[in-house]
Structures are given as structure tokens and as C-alpha cells.
Image: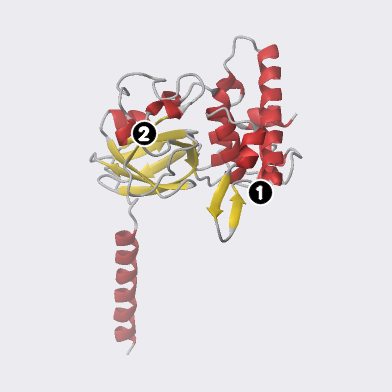
Amino acid sequence: MRCLQARRGAVAVAVLLLTVSLSSDDFVSADDSTVTVELFDAIDSEQVSVQFIALDANHANVLIENRTDRVLHLELPNAIAAVPVLAQLGFGGQQAGFGAQQGQGGQNGGGNQSVGGGFQQGAQPGGNAFGNNGLGNNLGGGNARQGNGFGMGFMRIAAQKTRKLVATTVCLEQGKPEPNAKVKYQMIRIEQYTQDERLVELCQQLALENVSQKVAQAVAWHYANGLSWEELAKLNRIESRYLGNIRMFRQQELNDAKAFVEALEKSSNESSQTLPESSLSQNLSVSQNSAVLIAR
């Protein structure tokens, strides 16, 4: 009887170990080597392939396939942009070809809107970021996350495996159709889309969940497309002869957007005065030090 129980126990342990080993996509043997590389560098060198699936104006699925025989430790960017493939006329080689100086994606011609944003975070709540500086209701419902979170760090992907990330996005070309999964997009470095560091910072803060998507959308169209607050207030999300017009933004969301812009402009001015030779992106990088600077 005891012998039978022992055999059953051994079989149970073996099954458990087999289940664990087969269910882990990240299992690495002692002989495997890991390569650390920045995500876009990995794309350029064809170590990974990426599918950017824009689900709607707010979110996108990003499928990353490791095409190598080694484990990759991918450094993820603070912010990203994505453009419809058919809108890429004249794209080749021009670092700021899409949006010139202010991310004015409308210069791309027809098609759906380009988007900007960042990967959803795994950071811990807390810190002195935009969402926690007393400007409205966490700037429209943001969670005030701060720190060296998932999207601001690294992602490990096993050899010949595919992993999915979720990106939070805003549209950058008001007036064009919204993104959808039927339209093919290409993810690019955000610096290829815009040289406007305020827009870059907005996308970083959106990824950190320090600003809500609706508030970030108002700020994005204000910066990228030059819409005034009055013009934004008149935009309709729904126009129906039966339901009437439903506005795109509530007044509180616009108030929070104004507060965000004021805080960002103030931080930018203070940074340029104290460190005139430093770029705005350095002063406003999403790190612990920059968060403290922004909250002043």
C-alpha cells in the first residue's frame, strides 16, 4: 500500500514539473544566452518583427516576435508613434518627415489618424508625477503611477516566441477617421513623427497613467493640430438628429487639459532657464528626478 502511494506521489510530482516547464514561455536553460537590445534597434536589425494593431483611438495591441535563437532582453521606449502604412509617402529616411516641428500629422495626406502613446505600465502607485501634483482629479482620472515601471524598463522574450504588449494611445490628426484594426499601421520612433518635446512628454505621461486618455487627447490635438480650447469644446463625438449632439470632451476634462499644459509649459520654462544647453527631453524624461521637477 505504501509502495503504491509512493508511486502515485512520484507520478504527481513528475506531472507537475512537466506542466510548469511546458507552460512557461520564458523558460531558459543554463546554455542559453541573453542579448540586451533596444526595441527599435532590434527592429532595425531584424532581430524582432512587430505588428501594431490599432484597436481604436485609445488602445493598440503590439505583437513582438523574437526571430533569433537567443533570449532577448528588450529595452522598451518611453513613448512611441504609429502611422498608417498607406500614409507613409515620403517617409524613407526622414527623421521628422511626418510631423515637421509640431507633429502635424495632417501633412501626411489622406487615411486614418496617426497615433502616439506608450506601453501600459507595471509601475507602483505613488510619486510626484503630473497626476499627483494637485492639478484637478489626477488630471482626469490618472492613477498617478510613477517609477521604473514595465514600459520604462525591459521585456524578456524567449527565442522564437511572440509576446503581446498593450499600448495606450491618442490620435494626432484631428479630422481624419479614427484608427481601427482593419487599417495596417507601422510603429515608429516618436522622434520620427514629431520634434515637439511637449507632445513626446504627453505620450510618456499617458503611458505612466498620470493623465487620462481623454485629457491627453485634448492636449494632443491642442499641440499637434493647433486647436484652441474653444475649438476643442465645440467638437462633437456624436451628431444625431434623434439624440442631439454629444460633445467630445466634458468641461472638466478640458480644465484638466489646460492644467496639464500650464504645468508642462512652466516646467519647460524653468528647465530652459536653469539648464539652457540641455534639451527639453532630458529635463522632462519620465524618471524620479523629472517627476519631482514637474510637480514644483
Q: Secondary structure at mark 2?
A: loop
Provide the residue designation for mark 1: 141
Above or below, 117 relative to 278: below
The image quarter containing residue 273 is top right
Q: Residues within 10 Å of mark 2 (few under 14, many from 20)?
A: few
Provide the residue designation for mark 2: 110
Residue 61 shown left or right of residue 10 in the figure: right
Q: Residue 15 at x, y = what percent? A: 30, 71
Q: Is residue 56 visible?
A: yes
Looking at the image, which is closer to me, 265 or 234?
Answer: 234
Q: Residues within 10 Å of mark 1 (few under 14, many from 20)?
A: some
The image quarter containing residue 281 is top right
Q: Quadrant of the N terminus?
A: bottom left
Residue 275 shown left or right of residue 181 in the figure: right
Q: Colour mode? A: secondary structure
Above or below, 64 relative to 11: above
Q: Residue 200 at x, y = what percent? A: 53, 29
Earlier-in-chain disc, 2 versus 1: 2
Toward the top, the furthest residue is 277
Do the residues under discs 2 and 1 have CB atoms within 8 angstroms? no
Q: Quadrant of the C terminus?
A: top right
Q: Residue at x 55, y 23 (%)?
A: 197
- The amino acid on which the numbered mark 1 sits, given as a three-letter code, is Gly
